[in-house]
Image: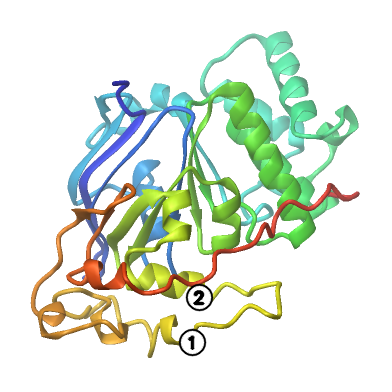
Amino acid sequence: MTAPLLELRDVGVTYGNGVRAVDGVSLTLGRGETLAVVGESGCGKSSLGRLVMRLTDPTAGGILLGGQDITRLSRAALRPLRRRFQMIFQDPFASLNPRMTVRATLDTQLIAQRIGDRRERDRRVVTVAERVGLDAAALERYPHEFSGGQRQRIGIARALILEPELVVCDEPVSALDVSIRAQILNLLMDLQAEHGLSYLFISHDMGVVEHIADRVVVMYLGRLVEEAPAARLFAAPAHPYTRALLAAVPQPDPRQRLRFEDLASGDVPSPLSPPPGCHYHPRCRFATEICGQARPPLAPVPGGGQVACHHAALIALADPPAAPQGMFTAAPADGA
């Protein structure tokens, strides 16, 4: 069996204010695979992405890239490895330097990695810009001269110009209109097919995840509560929190019955003082006494994947909420 490109082993990070943003997360990402990380705001998704990129140092566990442990590498030791893993940020405007043209933004990546002479760098800049849908004239313009969708294309080009194996996509389409989202998602999928890219795709939008993911991991207050192939997770969610996320997705069919009983009750607890046992139990309609006393271990689920729930067998008997219905397959629109 082929070794995974990315492996996290019981990774955790606790910030100075005592918040355990990531709490013992283990997962793998295969070559050419899209693994989505989903959950509400504050669940630890972006913190996990920053850990993978080594923008934040883990306080526990290990991070392996292609079998190499990068958990404690210094900035100098990480520099040559940065070519292998890159990131697409959520805000396509804030993540670009407003004083640099597109050409300079892309060229800087190559200069930092000492790749090619000026002629080779120019060739690579033009090639990657054209592949993401930007013409040569766009290379001399500044970020404020582009639409949101075009700026995200620049962000994608910046991530791809070093020809990485892994791309961490942190909410890459959440700031875009729906029709533009479809174009960017389809572009990411095309690029993956062409170059064999692996995506760690962070999102709170289950409709987007249903469109792009091969596998899904669900996080709640820093913990992984469910992991499964996308098809199984959407057809038969095994954790009450996963059911709540799916139940909250707007359904385009007005005849679709809303399942209010699956929606999470109350507010998200403070990460400074999370509930004991299963963090989700104060909001869960399936909770019993044991849920507030013991943290449930991850256990295998029929159909593939694993779930951290004391009552997974009972939940499997309940009717699942409706899955998203092809919400992001819109045809390309002008101006993206």
Query: From this viewpoint, is residue 42 visible?
Result: no
Q: Please give the residue where the numbered disc 2 appears in the rendered image.
A: 247
Query: From this viewpoint, is residue 225 visible?
Result: yes
Q: Who is closer to the viewer here, 159 or 239?
A: 239
Q: Please give the residue where the numbered disc 1 appears in the rendered image.
A: 260
Q: Is residue 195 left or right of residue 280?
A: right
The spot of residue 147 in percent (x, y) is: 82, 53
C-alpha span from label 2 to label 1: 7 Å
Give the image's coloring scheme: rainbow
The spot of residue 230 in percent (x, y) is: 46, 50
Q: Is residue 288 left or right of residue 82?
A: left
The tag earlier along the polypeptide, 2 or 1, is 2
Residue plotted at (63% across, 37% down): 189
Q: Looking at the image, is 224 positioned above or below residue 80?
A: below
Crowd class of label 2 (few under 14; some 14 to 19; many from 20; radius 10 Å): many
Residue plotted at (21% across, 72% down): 311
Which secondary structure lies at badge 2? helix
Farthest-out residue, bottom: 266
Say which mark, if any, is on residue 79.
none
Residue plotted at (25% across, 73% down): 314
Q: Is residue 195 left or right of residue 183?
A: left
Q: Is residue 108 left or right of residue 127?
A: left
Residue plotted at (45% across, 25% down): 84
Q: Who is closer to the viewer here, 39 or 290?
A: 290
Q: Looking at the image, is 224 positioned above or below residue 152?
A: below
The spot of residue 48 in percent (x, y) is: 36, 52
